[in-house]
Image: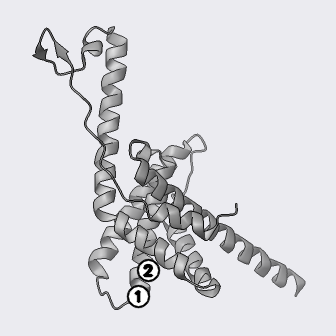
Amino acid sequence: MVVTSQTLFQFSQVRPSLPQPHPRGTSKGKPSHYPAPLCRAPISEWRQTVFSWFRSDKRRKKIREDQRYLEARARRLLGSYLDAGDREKQQYYEVIAGAAAACHPSVSDPRLEDVKIAQASAEAAIKIFKFRAQEFSDANDRLAQTITDAYATVAIAYRRAAAVYILNKDMQKLGTAAVHLVTIANSYIAAQSGELSKREDAQ
């Protein structure tokens, strides 16, 4: 996958906008707890719609939390990555790939869906990020800050993969940039490992 710096820059510069609440319906001139079409819908459709609302509310809550805790740190890492030279970019790849590997669960059940794996990975990344944000708060320690930012970026990438951001276009774009960077980082590490294995075999 070829991703240009301009593409990542465009994704990383998008600013967030909170989703608007769903309009309430009315029935006979009085407010209703549900939109009017739902009040007249069959039971099966009603249950499906209510379930969809609950799922959307969970997504909105996660989006708000990510905007509060993760967004600024991820944008900072993406911006620093874009400004870095080729050699420094390789260091970013190592940090990002390491964070992604640390958060990926060991899958023993092959039937486990990719979305659930992404959700578990995102939760693991957020947990590590919050821990590091408290324990490594020294702004002068650039490496520690970069590693912490990497976990925020990985968390957003996995949230994007788990379809959490479909309700927010700006976070969706930021998530896409994070996914691209994680993909590039993993590809770089895989290539480096392949070259190292060839050298060892040659010896």
| Amino acid type at image mark 2 | Thr
Please tell me which residue lies in front, 134 or 27.
27
Circle count: 2
Q: CA distance from mark 1 to mark 2?
A: 6 Å
Q: Identify the image quadrant of the N terminus.
A: bottom right
Q: Quadrant of residue 189?
A: bottom right
Residue at image point 31% right, 43% down: 19
Which residue is rendered at x = 32% and y = 50% of the image?
62
Residue kind at label 1, given as amino acid type: Arg
Give the left or right position of residue 35, taking residue 191 as reference.
Answer: left
Q: Is residue 47 visible?
A: yes
Q: Is residue 18 left or right of residue 74?
A: left
Tell me, for residue 146, which label it has, or none: 2
What x and y, as percent, mark residue 60? 31, 44
Q: Which residue is mark 1?
A: 142
Mark 1 residue crowding within 10 angstroms, few (<14) / some (14–19) / many (20+): few
